[in-house]
């Protein structure tokens, strides 16, 4: 248990502020109280205030949710904002079958056709 918290703490230190903000807003419902506390502490250390967190949550209000928890983008860890058809590609090249992809705000903008790249 203690080891696990230590791992979460280390992970929080190495995560981007955007990632941490996503975690305690859109993904909050799927997290343990102890993990939320660690992330809030880390954000506080970085000078992020309560109002910044609220604002971030509001900016993510268009996310696609399954119950209380936001769905993740198919290409990165950001919350998804659109669902679209695309080709599932073998080795990232050969189109195999059409499937539904979830895209975050960044990948929605970078998307050209059904090109599948990782962030
Ligand atoms: Zn993305």
Image (cartoon, rainbow, N blue to C red):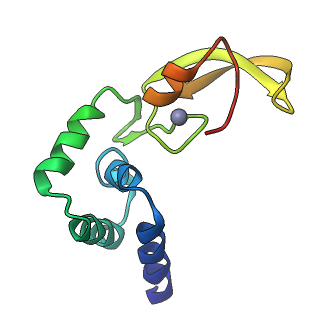
Where does residue 44 sit, x and y in percent of width and height?
21, 67
Q: Quadrant of residue 112?
A: top right
Looking at the picture, does residue 86 appear above or below residue 11? above
Of all residues shown, which one is farthest toward the left? 51
Q: Quadrant of the C terminus?
A: top right
Of all residues shown, which one is farthest toward the bottom? 2
| 97 displayed left or right of 84 | right
Q: Is residue 104 visible?
A: no
Looking at the picture, does residue 8 appear above or below residue 104? below
Which of 87 and 116 lies nearest the eye of the viewer? Answer: 116
Where does residue 111 sit, x and y in percent of width and height?
59, 19
| 88 displayed left or right of 67 | right
Of all residues shown, which one is farthest toward the top? 113
Point 50% across, 21% down: residue: 108
Looking at the picture, does residue 92 appear above or below residue 68? above
Q: Quadrant of residue 90?
A: top right
| 96 displayed left or right of 77 | right
Q: Quadrant of residue 86?
A: top right
Which of 46 and 87 lies nearest the eye of the viewer? Answer: 46
Q: Is residue 82 visible?
A: yes
Point 41% across, 52% down: residue: 19
């Amino acid at each position: 248990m203690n080891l696990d918290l230590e791992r979460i703490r280390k992970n929080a230190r190495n995560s981007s502020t955007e990632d941490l903000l996503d975690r305690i807003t859109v993904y909050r419902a799927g997290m343990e109280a102890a993990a939320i506390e660690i992330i809030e502490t880390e954000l506080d250390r970085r000078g992020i205030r309560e109002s910044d967190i609220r604002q971030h949550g509001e900016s993510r209000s268009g996310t696609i949710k399954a119950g209380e928890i936001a769905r993740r983008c198919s290409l990165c860890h950001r919350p998804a904002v659109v669902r679209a058809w695309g080709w599932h590609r073998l080795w990232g090249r050969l189109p195999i079958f059409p499937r539904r992809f979830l895209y975050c705000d960044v990948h929605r903008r970078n998307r050209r056709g059904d090109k599948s790249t990782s962030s």
